[in-house]
Image (tube, rainbow, N blue to C red):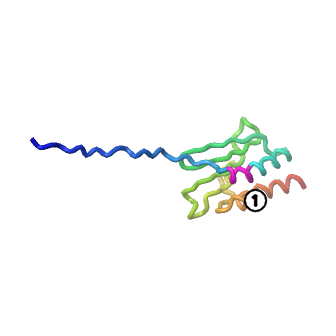
């Protein structure tokens, strides 16, 4: 009787990677958030770490939909840039490779509020 070989390949031990903001990315986001709270424009935030994308949502009131979403999508890092700011209506306000430059679209709104 011939001996049968076991050709079972085990499942890869790789769990899906969760995308999140790094501390160096959260620092400028939270700095902008603090200034907008001090100006009375923003009231609350939420962070979502998903499999494909990380989202920092900004709320005027906690019971509303977010007025802005700061998104990190590493799949777009080599194309349009992994960072983007999306308005409440779904329109992408700015996208790019440098988070500081992308956040400037929101800092311009802060300048309008203060003046």
In the depicted structure, whether residue 1 falls above or below residue 87: above
Q: Considering depth in this image, is 94 or 52 the residue closer to the camera?
A: 52
- Residue that badge 1 annotates: 104
In the depicted structure, whether residue 78 falls above or below residue 27: below
Q: Considering depth in this image, is 62 or 45 the residue closer to the camera?
A: 45
Q: Position of residue 63 (x, y in %)?
A: 72, 35
Is 27 covered by the magenta stretch?
Answer: yes
- Residue pictured at 28% horizontal, 44% vertical: 8
Q: Position of residue 65 (x, y in %)?
A: 69, 41
Callout 1 environment at 10 Å: few (<14), some (14 to 19), or many (20+)? some
Q: Secondary structure at mark 1?
A: helix
- Numbered disc total: 1
- Residue pictured at 40% horizontal, 46% vertical: 12
Residue 85 appears left or right of 12 = right
Give the quarter of the figure containing the N terminus.
top left
Q: Residue furthest left?
A: 1
């Amino acid at each position: 009787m011939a001996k049968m070989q076991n050709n079972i390949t085990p499942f890869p031990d790789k769990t899906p990677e969760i995308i999140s903001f790094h501390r160096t990315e959260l620092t400028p986001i939270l700095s902008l958030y603090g200034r907008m709270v001090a100006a009375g424009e923003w009231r609350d935030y939420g962070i979502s770490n998903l499999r494909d994308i990380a989202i920092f949502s900004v709320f005027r009131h906690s019971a509303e939909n977010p007025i802005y979403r700061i998104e990190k999508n590493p799949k777009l890092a080599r194309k349009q840039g992994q960072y983007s700011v999306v308005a409440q209506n779904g329109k992408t306000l700015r996208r790019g490779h440098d988070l500081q430059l992308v956040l400037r679209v929101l800092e311009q709104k802060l300048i309008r509020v203060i003046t």
